[in-house]
Amino acid sequence: MSDKKQQKPNSKERILRTAISLFARKGFAETGMRELAAEAEVNLSMVNYFFGSKKGLLKEILDDFLSGYLAIAREKLAGTGDLHSRLERFIVSAVNYFEAERDSLIITISELPHDDPEIVEHKASWAGQMVEIVNRELCLPHGEKPGQNIPATCLAPMLTSLMASRFLFGPLMEEVKAGSSRAVSTENYTKMLVGILLQGITGADNKGGERKI
Amino acid sequence: MSDKKQQKPNSKERILRTAISLFARKGFAETGMRELAAEAEVNLSMVNYFFGSKKGLLKEILDDFLSGYLAIAREKLAGTGDLHSRLERFIVSAVNYFEAERDSLIITISELPHDDPEIVEHKASWAGQMVEIVNRELCLPHGEKPGQNIPATCLAPMLTSLMASRFLFGPLMEEVKAGSSRAVSTENYTKMLVGILLQGITGADNKGGERKI
DNA sequence: TTGTTGTTCAAACGTTCGTTTAATTTTATG
DNA sequence: CATAAAATTAAACGAACGTTTGAACAACAA
């Protein structure tokens, strides 16, 4: 018994982990409670016991992921440093976070457009805070240059979608070309994103400086 | 009777349109056959009569959308012209297509990561062709410059995700800030994308020419 | 011990699901 | 008109859904 209790963690945590895996692979509505309970090796009732309902479980997954994403945005986009370095360290942190929590990312993106009133307020709350940060740290400081002002409600989705593309399309691309996920390392992927984004959103007046890649 | 029969189109088409709307708003699995039939003003059995099954209906929606997207990629990315103009006209066409078929786009993206074996082969077939086009028309001609070669299995998802972000996040952003969808016109949105992408993926050696925006 | 609190369990709740059947109505063709 | 084909209908199928119940079990304090 050198480990604490690695072989049998909390039932609640086991449910959470299994749910994240199943929801990402099969979809939330397509995953049944009995299937989830069986895979997590718990009794059927335990899900409702710990999370109240199936949607309560989904809400916890979304909140866990989005709060982590928002914390990264808050920490990395703000503070000292010019736009380039702040954006770069944000992308590095966010992409690493997406990779570590890729199943939660897939669930979040997949459930994004659905208008379940019980869920949509949660998403809107997180999205609103994200837009606020992007607006304060990225849009406003560079709104001086005319013709380059991208609204935060447009830029925030762009950034998130671009960073998430690798993981959203990952399973499908693996089906298309086996091993394609490992053809580009995560480190190189972030470098690509930084290169694309920095030289783009900083304007056409960029005279080839900032050779970040 | 000036119109052909605008008030009552084919039942099959009515089912298709209603399904696209409901699947996009509520999700595929969350939408019931009875709800769909009621909203389409059609008997419950008609869905299976015309489409075989609920999944057959989804497959038709996905195939319709993806074939149109692939046709645009084929037509706009290939042909004469330098990379800049070809990429620009592709983005213009694709974004307009996404806007016209935004519900189908939402359905396609939302169902992307799910591994239903009956659906995944369809998606993989389309994705494989898309990757092939991107590789032939974008990656290979510019693979000469070292350090800038982004694999097509990485670039194609990037392009698609970036163009789709406006529509994927649209409903949520409207919840965050009413009217945000109309804050940026589709034309300006495409110009933003062109500006970001062109100056990014064409490399850091770009000396500020090509002021497309 | 007794009582309490937090888990786990088997069983069943009523509902809704996607699908099928068989009869009927409509449409088109000879 | 007659007849075959296509479209539409009401009703029911068995299966699976999310949820609830009430009892049993574990750990621990009084």
Image: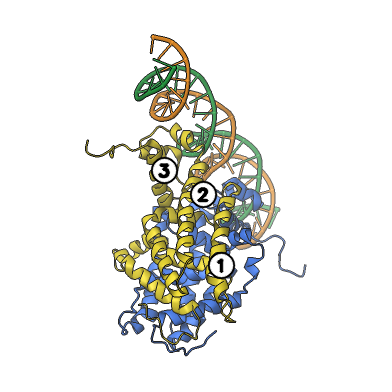
Chain colours: A yellow, B blue, C orange, D green
Residue A168 sits in quarter = bottom left
The subunit letter for the residue under badge 1 reads A
Point out which mark residue B29 bears. Answer: 2
Q: Residue B32: x, y in percent?
A: 57, 47
Q: Amino acid at mark 3?
A: Leu
Q: Amino acid at mark 1?
A: Arg
Image position of A5 with respect to A175: above or below = above
Query: Gap in Å between the C-alphas at discs 1 and 3?
Result: 34 Å
Q: Give the structural element (helix, strand or loop) at label 3.
A: helix
Taking the image as drawn, is residue B24 in sight? Answer: yes
- The crowd level at tag 1 (other Cα within 10 Å; few <14, some 14-19, many 20+) is some
Q: Give the structural element (helix, strand or loop) at label 1.
A: helix
Residue at position x 42%, y 57% from top?
B113
Q: How many marks?
A: 3
Which residue lies under the disc numbered 1?
A136
Q: Amino acid at mark 2?
A: Ala
